[in-house]
Image (cartoon, helix red, strand yellow):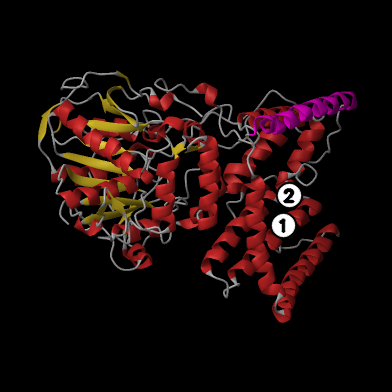
């Protein structure tokens, strides 16, 4: 078997059983094959549905009959719950705190209208599109007629193998529901093909059209409606409508929680407590300012690497995605490898922070943390990790430090972090000059910050089938509480963003791509990443919808030092939070980020399991010296609070 290249230092009711304990071994794994395969997709949350104390649906071969007395009572309750729902929806109007969903609908209609105009402006093109759909429907109708006559018939338009919306046997066995399913699938594919073939339109319009079409087709799936979903229909009859009563009650609660907007609950958060079974790795807050708390974690080894580690997480979410539980905690695992770990915990901003900009986050976040680490450990030389937008901030800091000759960061790790936003994926749909002005108006109206729900909704729309409609069906139509799941509890624990920072980030990164093009200025100095020559470990995730792997690969080329580029299986979270003990997603190593991304992937070597051991070997090779392990409070900084601190507890 080929030998792995060495690390270089130069240029919702019951949770599933957790993964096995994280592996502390740091040795590299053996490669399994030369060509990179399509990896396992992003870690899927546990099934949204969960067993509850409610009547079970009748067997598939017998239509259940409702209890008509109970049904009549439930209908009356539905009217009552519907009134509560409407009250929750309209209550924000009394305070002038109502959103403007009409703007989003108008943008979607305008974009899809351009696709329609493209075809209707050419009679031959329109006729060909209509004929293609008609032929498929004729084939489907003929197939359905054969099935109704008792004959076997191959499906005309089968759903994708991983599509769980149509798993119930009656979608396959009942000709009526099978027809609905296939009609939906072939119409959806036909519409997607129309957008893909509208090649005379600009790429930006087609990307937006593909995104909006995905939202529309996901919403119109027959699986989302009681009369057209056999499982929902049977459940409703078997429970005499009690499922819908429970669902309306939850919907009213979720609309109230979203202040007039539906905030779909994804997990039962009542089973989790910060510092107990979430973000529970022992440590102390050793420094605090207006923007962040700095946490130093307690050692679990007798000696530690001399060079401390600083982790800069995204401020869009909270840091404890890296400390979900002992089995999945990257922080706890890093401590177990002998690292002195410091983590920035960002403040959940409010009106007081409205003018805190990107540069403030760099100076009061990254630079203030480095200064505090020196006081806590006596070490001026640190290694740093930046995750997601925290990685974008860290890369900017590296450029700013290179411009002034500041050498306090000796190596950097960028996890699913973008530098070049040319291929930034579907999130670019939300960023153009018009929408940026709308966001600025919204932040001004709120008092100088963007509510966390805004970005949470945007992330959910990247995967609408899994993160919106599966929970809509489970919660509001089946009337079932979602399962307790730590990752989704974290995902729902969103954070606000100060107006000044968010404006700078969207305009200078997503809209103008100034960081990659060398046009960004911090403190009056132009940021030139080619002058940042420290070694960098760059991780991209193959199925990342937020920081696409191609975008991360392109951005890595802007750095001036040696880059060890690694591609992880799965997506933005599971590709990063992939402990060795779980033996889940693979990773690929193929040399520095040079040339074409697809060519790099084709030539890369695949290795089983987590990238974590490869990373610690890379880090240890650069600075192998060790010292006695350091305890929080052992230096010049006295502990202020127990981990995970106070800032992380502020919810929106």
Above or below for 346 versus 558: above
Residue 141 relative to residue 515: left or right: right
Residue at x 51%, y 43% (from the top left corner): 455
Cα–Cα gap, marks 2 and 1: 7 Å
Q: Quadrant of the N terminus?
A: bottom left
Between 375 and 626, the residue placed more toward the observer is 375
Q: Secondary structure at mark 1?
A: helix
Work out whether residue 434 or residue 282 is closer to the camera in this orientation and state it. 434
Q: Which mark is residue 184?
A: 1
Q: Is residue 202 visible?
A: yes
- Percent of width and height locating residue 269: 53, 26
Q: Which residue is mark 2?
A: 222
Q: What span is colored magenta in the figure?
A: 68-96
Residue 95 colored in magenta in the image? yes
Sequence order check, earlier mark of 2 and 1: 1
Packing grade of label 2 (10 A; few <14, some 14-19, many >=20) is: many
Q: Percent from the top left, x then y, of residue 424?
A: 44, 57
Question: In this image, 334 relative to 457: left or right?
Answer: left
Asked whether the beta carbons under mark 2 and mark 1 sit within 8 Å of each other, the answer is yes
Quadrant location of residue 549?
bottom left
Please tell me whether residue 173 is drawn above or below residue 98 in the rendered image.
below
* The label number, if any, that marks residue 63 in the structure image: none
**Residue 153 colored magenta?**
no
Image quarter of residue 33: bottom left
Give the percent coordinates (x, y) of residue 514. Answer: 35, 58
- Write the residue at 36% across / 64% down: 597
Q: Residue at x 39, y 26 (%)?
A: 647
- The secondary element bearing badge 2 is classed as helix
In the depicted structure, whether residue 121 falls above or below residue 254: below
At x 39% / y 21%, what residue is drawn?
A: 275
Magenta residues, dominant SS class: helix
């Amino acid at each position: 078997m080929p030998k792995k290249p060495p690390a270089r230092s130069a240029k919702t009711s019951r949770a599933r059983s957790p993964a096995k304990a994280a592996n502390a071994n740091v040795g590299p794994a053996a490669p399994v094959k030369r060509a990179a395969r399509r990896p396992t997709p992003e870690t899927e949350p546990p099934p949204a549905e969960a067993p509850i104390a409610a009547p079970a649906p009748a067997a598939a071969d017998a239509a259940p009959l409702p209890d008509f007395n109970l049904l009549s009572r439930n209908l009356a309750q539905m009217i009552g719950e519907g009134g509560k729902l409407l009250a929750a929806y309209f209550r924000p109007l009394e305070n002038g705190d109502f959103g403007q969903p009409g703007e989003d609908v108008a943008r979607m209609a305008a974009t899809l209208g351009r696709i329609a105009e493209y075809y209707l402006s050419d009679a031959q093109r329109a006729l060909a599109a209509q004929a293609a759909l008609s032929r498929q429907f004729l084939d489907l109708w003929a197939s359905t007629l054969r099935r109704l006559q008792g004959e076997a018939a191959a499906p005309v338009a089968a759903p994708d193998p991983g599509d769980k919306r149509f798993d119930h046997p009656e979608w396959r066995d009942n000709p009526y529901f099978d027809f609905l399913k296939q009609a939906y699938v072939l119409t959806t594919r036909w519409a997607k093909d129309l957008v893909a073939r509208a090649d005379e339109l600009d790429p930006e319009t087609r990307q937006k059209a593909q995104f909006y079409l995905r939202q529309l087709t996901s919403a119109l799936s027959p699986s989302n409606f009681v009369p057209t979903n056999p499982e929902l229909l049977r459940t409703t009859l078997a429970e005499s409508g009690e499922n819908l009563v429970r669902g309306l009650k939850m919907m009213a609660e979720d609309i109230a929680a979203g202040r007039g907007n539906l905030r779909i609950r994804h997990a039962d958060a009542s089973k989790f407590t910060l510092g107990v079974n979430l973000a529970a790795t022992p440590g102390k807050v050793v420094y605090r300012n207006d923007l962040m708390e700095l946490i130093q974690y307690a050692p679990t080894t007798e000696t530690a690497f001399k060079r401390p580690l600083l982790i800069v997480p995204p401020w869009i979410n909270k840091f404890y995605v890296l400390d979900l539980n002992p089995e999945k905690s990257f922080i706890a695992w890093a401590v177990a490898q002998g690292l002195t770990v410091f983590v920035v915990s960002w403040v959940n901003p409010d009106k007081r922070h409205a003018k805190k900009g990107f540069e403030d986050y760099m100076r009061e976040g990254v630079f203030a943390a480095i200064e505090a680490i020196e006081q806590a450990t006596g070490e001026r030389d640190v290694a740093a990790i930046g995750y997601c937008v925290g990685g974008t901030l860290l890369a900017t800091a590296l450029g700013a430090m290179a411009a002034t000759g500041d050498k306090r960061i000796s190596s950097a790790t960028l996890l699913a972090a973008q530098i070049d936003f040319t291929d930034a994926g579907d999130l670019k749909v939300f960023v153009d000059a018009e929408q940026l002005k709308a966001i600025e108006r919204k932040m001004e109206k709120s008092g100088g910050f963007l509510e966390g729900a805004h970005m949470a909704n945007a992330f959910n729309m990247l995967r609408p089938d899994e993160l919106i409609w599966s929970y809509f069906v489970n919660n509001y139509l089946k009337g079932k509480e979602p399962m307790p799941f730590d990752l989704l509890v974290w995902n729902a624990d969103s954070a606000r963003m100060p107006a000044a920072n968010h404006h700078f980030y969207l305009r200078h990164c997503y809209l103008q791509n100034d960081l990659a093009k060398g046009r960004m200025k911090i403190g009056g100095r132009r940021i030139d990443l080619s002058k940042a020559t420290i070694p960098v470990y760059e991780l991209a995730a193959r199925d990342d919808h937020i920081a696409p792997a191609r975008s991360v690969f392109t951005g890595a080329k802007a750095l001036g030092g040696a880059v060890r580029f690694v591609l992880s299986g799965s997506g933005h979270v599971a590709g990063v939070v992939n402990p060795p003990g779980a033996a889940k997603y693979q990773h690929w190593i193929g040399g520095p980020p040079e040339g074409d991304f697809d060519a790099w992937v084709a030539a890369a070597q695949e290795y089983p399991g987590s990238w974590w051991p490869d990373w610690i070997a890379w880090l240890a090779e650069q600075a192998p010296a060790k010292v006695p392990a350091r305890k929080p409070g052992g230096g010049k900084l006295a502990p202020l609070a127990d981990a995970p601190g106070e800032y992380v507890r502020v919810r929106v």
